[in-house]
Image (cartoon, helix red, strand yellow):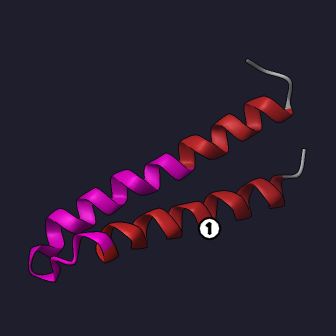
């Protein structure tokens, strides 16, 4: 299992999802709610990493 590859993919997906929320929302005045939405988007990257790990180890 290539943990480096999985980690890099998760990190880049997290960064892209996190920044996408700020770019698309464009509401810099409501930084707290944007940061919360960005964190939720970032969790999607972690879930993607878990899925990749399961697939590579032959799980569901």
**In the displayed image of the protein, which residue is found farthest to the left?**
29
Query: Which element type, helix, strand or loop, lies under badge 1?
Result: helix
Task: Give the quadrant of residue 12.
Answer: bottom right
Q: Residue furthest right?
A: 1
Foreground residue among 1 and 16: 16
Q: Residue at x 45, y 49 (%)?
A: 43
In the current view of this chain or complex, which residue is farthest to the bottom? 28
Q: Nearer the viewer, residue 39 or 19?
A: 19
Considering the image in quadrants, where does the C terminus appear? top right
x 61%, y 64%: residue: 11
> How many numbered marks are there?
1
Q: Which residues are magenta?
A: 24-45
Q: Is residue 35 left or right of residue 54?
A: left
Q: Is residue 51 left or right of residue 21?
A: right
Badge 1, how many Cα within 10 Å: few under 14, some, many 20+? few
The residue tagged 1 is 12
The residue depicted at 26 percent of the width and 67 percent of the height is: 35
Q: Is residue 52 above or below residue 41?
A: above
Q: Position of residue 56 (x, y in %)?
A: 84, 35
Q: Quadrant of the N terminus?
A: top right
- 11, above or below 3, in the image: below
Q: Quadrant of residue 31?
A: bottom left
Say left or right for 11 vs 32.
right
The secondary structure that most of the magenta stretch takes on is helix
Rendered location of residue 58, percent (x, y): 85, 23
Please tell me which residue is depicted at 55% across the width and 41% down the height of the picture: 47
Q: Is residue 31 left or right of residue 35?
A: left
Q: Is residue 36 magenta?
A: yes
């Amino acid at each position: 299992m290539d943990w480096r590859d999985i980690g890099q993919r998760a990190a880049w997906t997290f960064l892209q999802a996190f920044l996408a929320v700020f770019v698309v929302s464009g509401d810099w005045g409501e930084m707290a709610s944007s940061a919360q939405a960005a964190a939720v988007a970032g969790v999607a990257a972690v879930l993607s990493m878990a899925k990749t790990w399961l697939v590579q180890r032959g799980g569901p």
